[in-house]
Amino acid sequence: MRQLFFEPNGNRIKDSVATPHLPEDAELVRAAQQGDQQAISTLYQRHVGQVYRYVYLRVSNTALAEDLTSEVFIRAIETLPKYEERGVPFLGWLYHIARGLIIDHYRREKRRGPTTSFDQLTLHAAGDSTEEAVMADLEKGAILQALEHLTEEQQQVLMLRFIQGHNLDETATLMGKQEGAIKALQFRALRRLARFLNRDSDEAE
């Protein structure tokens, strides 16, 4: 059953974009760990949209994405007293929880689900010639098949970089890695993706 979050006055919390005057996540987390309900509400509003998009791109089902997103925040609230940043920001921690729930879901389903619904996406420009060449030539159906051959981390780095539009530094922070490691991971992911796409193209001729 889908679970929604509500303000103390009974109104449903709506997804909103954080404004500059709001406290930093670290400050809100400290307050939330002390039981501050408003801090919890602010963290939810600030990140629910990004978490939902992350989940939806992995399950391609609106109702399931809403259920899993709710479960992410339930798990986060339950384990918040034990949360420590340790170089990974709060949003990265939420992504980690989401990833675990998605994996558990597909294990229960005994199948590997679609990685991304590209009909719903806007791919962001990558910047260098290799990335541009790969992204410019991708066919939607071919992408879905080719992505299945990538590792979980390779899928995640492409999602954060080209689907959610994070830069290298942000992606490194969210994945808890050094920027150099993200560059290498991204390069390998794009090369592998291109290799499978080229193979499929050759077979079709």
Image (spheres, rainbow, N blue to C red):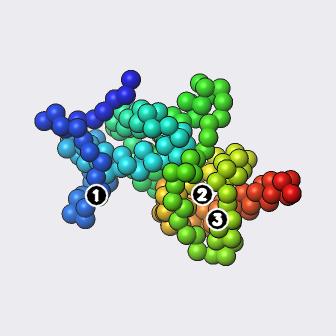
The residue lying furthest to the front in this view is 205
- Mark 3 highlights which residue? 135
Q: Quadrant of residue 123?
A: bottom right
Q: Is residue 6 visible?
A: yes
Q: Nearer the viewer, mark 1 or mark 3?
A: 3
Residue 105 appears at what percent x and percent y? 55, 30
Residue 153 appears at what percent x and percent y? 63, 50
Mark closest to the chain's N terminus, 3 or 2 = 3
Q: Secondary structure at mark 3?
A: helix
Q: Is residue 135 left or right of residue 12?
A: right
- CA separation, marks 3 and 2? 11 Å
Q: Secondary structure at mark 1?
A: loop
The residue lying furthest to the left in this view is 9
Residue 150 appears at what percent x and percent y? 70, 49
- Mark 1 highlights which residue? 18
- Mark 2 highlights which residue? 158
Q: Which mark is residue 151?
A: none
How many numbered marks are there? Answer: 3
State the residue at coordinates (49%, 58%). Answer: 164
- CA separation, marks 2 and 1? 25 Å
Q: Quadrant of the C terminus?
A: bottom right
Q: Is residue 71 left or right of residue 107?
A: left
Q: Nearer the viewer, mark 3 or mark 2?
A: 3
Q: Is residue 100 visible?
A: no
* Label 3 close to label 2 by CB (< 8 Å): no
Above or below: residue 120 compared with residue 138: above
The amino acid on which the numbered mark 1 sits, given as a three-letter code, is Ala
Q: Is residue 113 left or right of residue 9?
A: right
State the residue at coordinates (58%, 35%). Answer: 103
- CA separation, marks 1 and 3? 30 Å
